[in-house]
Amino acid sequence: MTSPTYETLLVEETEEQIALVTLNRPAAANALNTQMGRDLLAVFSELLLDPRGLRCIVLTGAGDRAFCAGGDLRERNGMSDTDWMRQHAIFEQAFYAIMDCPVPIIAAVNGAAYGGGTEMALACDFIHASETARFALTEPRLGIIPGGGGTQNLPRAVGLRRAKELIFSTTPFTAQEAEGWGMVNKVWPAAALMPGVLELARTIAANGPIAVRQAKRAMSLGIETDLKTGLAIEIEAYNRTVPTADRREGVLAFNEKRSPRFTGQ
C-alpha cells in the first residue's frame, strides 16, 4: 500500500497487509484538532470503500506520554457555537468511519487517553494498553458530554452503572482497572506493547480475510439485536464465506498439512 502523507498522522504498512496508523502530534499530547479529525476521516473513509488488501490495522499515538489527550482545547478556545459544531461534525464522522471500517482495528494505547482519546480507543475493535496508560471521559468538566461515542461504547464495554459513575464523576482510571472491567483486553509493559500488538496483528492477518471481515460484521451488527436476528445475521455472513477461493484453500491446506495461502477471494 502506498500511503499519502497526512499532516497529523503517520500511516505506514509495517509489513504485508498490516497498517500502523499513528496519531502524530506528540508536542500536543496527540490532542485531536480539526486537521487530525480531517485526516482520520480521510484515512478510514477510504478504507471503508477500499480496504486495499489490508488485514489488520493498529492505531497508536506518537511518543510514550500520550495516546490522545482528547480535543485540542487551545484550538477550541474562543470558538463560536457554530464553529464548535462544525468541528465536532468532523470528529463524529471520523469516529464513525473508524467504527465502520471492515478491517479489524486494534487500539494500542501507549499513554494517556482522555476525553476523545478514550472514545477513539473504544471505537476500535479492541484495546491493548501499556501499563502506564490512563483513561478518563472528562467532558462534563467542560460543560459538555462525550460526543464521540463515549456514552454508547463505554456502557457496552464496562456496563451501564460503572459507565455512569465514570462519566458523571470524570474520574480517571488505570489500564489495569480497565482490563478488570473488560474494556481493555490486555495490559503490557510499556516496551512490550507494540511488539506484542504487532504479533497479534500478524496472527489476525494470517487468517482468511473474508472470514475475519464477515465475523466482524456479524458480531458488530448482531450484538445490537435480539438473539434470533443476530443468528440470521451470522448465517448470512457465513454463507458469504462459502463460495470463496479462501474457503477452498483453507480446507485444502489443512488436508495437505501446510499453512493456507489466502488471497481474499
Image (cartoon, rainbow, N blue to C red):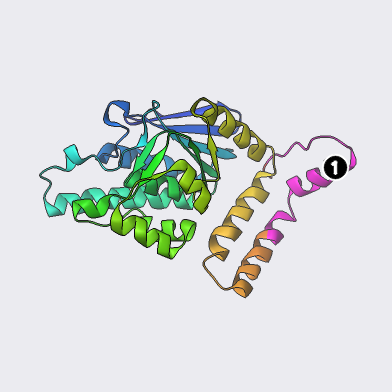
- Look at the image and tell me whether residue 48 can be seen: no
- From the top left corner, tell me how far across and down residue 10 is, in percent: 41, 28
Q: Secondary structure at mark 1?
A: helix
Q: Amino acid at mark 1?
A: Phe
Q: Is residue 240 magenta?
A: yes
Above or below: residue 51 compared with residue 214: above
- Quadrant containing the C terminus in the rendered view: top right
Q: Looking at the image, which is closer to me, 65 or 38?
A: 65
Query: Badge 1: few (under 14), some or many (20 or more) residues near its Cα, within 10 Å?
Result: few
Name the quadrant containing residue 16.
top right
Residue stretch in magenta: 238-263
Q: Residue at x 38, y 44 (%)?
A: 135
- From the top left corner, tell me how far across and down residue 232 is, in percent: 64, 70
- From the top left corner, tell me how far across and down residue 59 is, in percent: 46, 37
Q: Residue at x 14, y 54 (%)?
A: 82
Left/right placement of residue 94 relative to residue 50 reads left
- From the top left corner, tell me how far across and down residue 27 is, in percent: 28, 26
Q: Looking at the image, which is closer to me, 130 or 231?
A: 130
Q: Residue at x 30, y 59 (%)?
A: 168
Left/right placement of residue 118 relative to residue 35 reads right
Label count reads: 1
- Look at the image and tell me whether residue 121 can be seen: yes
Report which residue position mark 1 lands on.
254
Q: Is residue 150 magenta?
A: no
Q: Residue at x 62, y 31 (%)?
A: 199
Q: Looking at the image, which is closer to me, 163 or 152?
A: 163
